[in-house]
Image (cartoon, coloured by chain):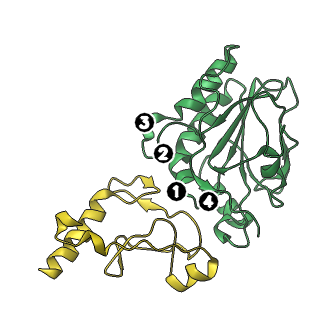
């Protein structure tokens, strides 16, 4: 976050412990990363629920984690919006 | 066998589950196959999806040597419709698996084995004693790993040796147990 010009203290970790919380948050799986409320990757047709999230890396591989480049890009975009 | 499932050397629990054709599938009888692999998997877990091609490739390749593979989905299909029998059939029919895909509706089989995650692998010898349990390989993100731990265990059993490693930590999504 700091590298993107953002304040690391603004990082908020939130837990969705129940189906109701997942529904309320529109939570499609762990981990979900939102920057200024926007998901770093298209949610697509993934259903809301307490589960692991399916990510596609930039080379097409399936992963349980987002591509680091997608995270960096989302943070940089937010940083530019602040500048 | 313990309350938490089976350990190395334990016999395979009874398994008789419906496949995607509605046929009951069981494990081979002792002495019927040189090794048997029971893979817990599902339709929506990223770890299971990432490792899927590596596991089906191994199933197809080791079939020539008599090794039997079965895949089992024990997730609560009511809360996770992506794991419903219909969704299982649709996914199964869309690709070549090299193993039947079974639905553990009551989750009793998963509890008997002590399954933790998808995927979670149980490799049995010809007498259906557990000889390897754990992950397919060291990294779900790296297809070049090629299910190396699974293949190593099978190669050892087929050569009459003990798998090494015999246990690795299952890595993946937790089984979606019924409330």
Point out the tag, 3 or 4, that comes first from the N-terminus: 4
Q: Nearer the viewer, residue A19 or B140?
A: A19
Q: Nearer the viewer, residue A66 or B155?
A: A66
Spatial CA distance of label 3 from label 4 is 22 Å
Residue under the point 88% across and 31% down: B29
- Is residue A8 toward the left or the right of residue B22 in the image? left
Q: Quadrant of the C terminus of chain B?
A: bottom right
* Residue bearing mark 1: B46
Task: Classify mark 4: residues with Cα within 10 Å, few (<14), some (14-19) or many (20+).
Answer: many
Residue A83 higher or lower than B124, as above or below: below
Taking the view exactly as shown, the residue that stands out farthest to the bottom is A24
Residue under the point 67% across and 26% down: B64
- Is residue B163 toward the left or the right of residue B19 in the image? left
* Same chain? Circles 2 and 4: yes
Q: Which chain is green?
A: B
Q: Which mark is residue B144?
A: 3
Look at the numbered disc 1 and give the secondary structure of its residue: helix
* Same chain? Circles 4 and 1: yes
Q: Which mark is residue B43?
A: 4
Look at the numbered disc 3 and give the secondary structure of its residue: helix
Point out the tag, 1 or 3, that comes first from the N-terminus: 1
């Amino acid at each position: 976050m700091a590298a993107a010009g953002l304040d690391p203290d603004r990082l908020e970790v939130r837990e969705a412990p129940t189906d109701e919380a997942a529904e309320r948050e529109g939570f499609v799986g762990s981990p979900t990363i939102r920057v200024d409320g926007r998901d770093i990757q298209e949610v697509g047709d993934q259903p809301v629920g307490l589960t692991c999230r399916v990510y596609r890396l930039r080379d097409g591989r399936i992963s349980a984690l987002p591509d680091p480049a997608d995270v960096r890009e989302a943070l940089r975009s937010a940083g530019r919006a602040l500048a | 066998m313990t309350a938490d499932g089976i350990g190395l050397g334990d016999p395979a629990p009874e398994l008789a589950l419906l496949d995607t054709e509605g046929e009951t599938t069981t494990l081979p009888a002792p002495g019927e196959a040189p090794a048997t692999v029971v893979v817990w998997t599902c339709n929506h877990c990223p770890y299971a999806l990432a490792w899927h091609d590596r596991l089906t490739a191994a199933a197809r390749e080791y079939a020539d040597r008599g090794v039997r593979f079965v895949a089992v989905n024990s997730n609560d299909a009511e809360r996770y419709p992506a794991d419903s029998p219909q969704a299982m059939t649709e996914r199964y029919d869309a690709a070549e698996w090299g193993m039947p895909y079974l639905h553990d509706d009551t989750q009793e089989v998963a509890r008997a084995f002590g399954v933790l995650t998808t995927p979670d692998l149980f490799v049995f010898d010809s007498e259906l004693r557990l000889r390897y349990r754990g992950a397919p390989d060291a990294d779900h993100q790296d297809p070049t790993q090629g299910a190396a731990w699974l293949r190593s265990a099978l190669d050892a059993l087929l050569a009459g040796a003990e798998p090494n490693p015999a246990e690795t930590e299952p890595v993946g999504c937790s089984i979606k147990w019924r409330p």
